[in-house]
Amino acid sequence: MKSLLIAAADALADGPAADLVALDLAAGSAGALPAGAVHVAVAPVEAAASAAGLARAMALAPAGIVLEGARSGRDVTLLDARLAVCEAERGLAHGGTSIIAVASAEALIEIGSFRGASARLAGLAFDPEALERELGAPDAAVSELARGMVVLAARAAGVPAFRVIRRPPA
């Protein structure tokens, strides 16, 4: 399982310590992508801030979007459509922005739905901290089961599996 660091711009000053780095715009603003960050994290597609966050993210022309709280492959398909519009509005290559979906606890019920959800899907991620928040308490057995399900779903979708690491703002 690869590592995916999600952090604010100022927390990335020491350089990335992960296989993939995503800028967390919710933790602060950035005028440009910091060195090493090629993806930008956005709120779940059903969140009120999702459209505005995606617009802010796409203004940075990232290589990819990290979709937090993905509930199923349908969320990835919806983000794919929104990305197509954003790319067209900004004159970016159609399909050039990839998606890494961070599976929510709800996603575990429909974990197989990520396969075939979008040609943009470039990874499926497990976030142990988010799972713990969703469950309301730590549960090592459930966390290990969820991790395994994400790994299997990623393999079925033909994409790498990631474990989310968060670094607080400096």
Image (cartoon, rainbow, N blue to C red):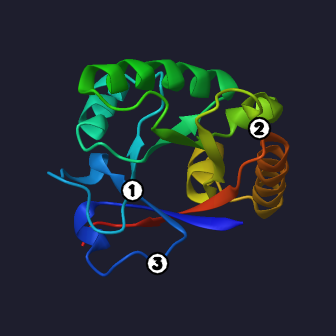
Q: Position of residue 61 (x, y in %)?
A: 30, 42
Give the quarter of the figure containing the C terminus. bottom left
Closer to us: 50 or 85: 85
Q: Which residue shows up at 29% across the image and 68% down it? A: 35
Cα–Cα span, label 2 and label 3: 28 Å
**In the rendering, which numbered label is found on residue 38?**
1
Is residue 14 among what the camera can see?
yes
Mark 1 crowdedness (10 Å alpha carbons): few <14, some 14-19, many ≥20: some
**Relative to residue 26, is residue 70 depicted above or below?**
above
Q: Position of residue 11 (x, y in %)?
A: 29, 70
Cα–Cα span, label 1 and label 3: 14 Å
Q: Position of residue 136 (x, y in %)?
A: 61, 47
Q: Position of residue 13 (x, y in %)?
A: 25, 76
Amino acid type, residue under disc 3 in the picture: Ala
Q: Earlier in the sequence, mark 2 or mark 3?
A: 3
Q: Earlier in the sequence, mark 1 or mark 3?
A: 3
Is residue 103 among what the camera can see?
no
Q: Which residue is mark 2?
A: 108
Give the quarter of the figure containing the N terminus. bottom right
Closer to us: 11 or 76: 76
Amino acid type, residue under disc 1 in the picture: Val
Q: Which residue is mark 3?
A: 17
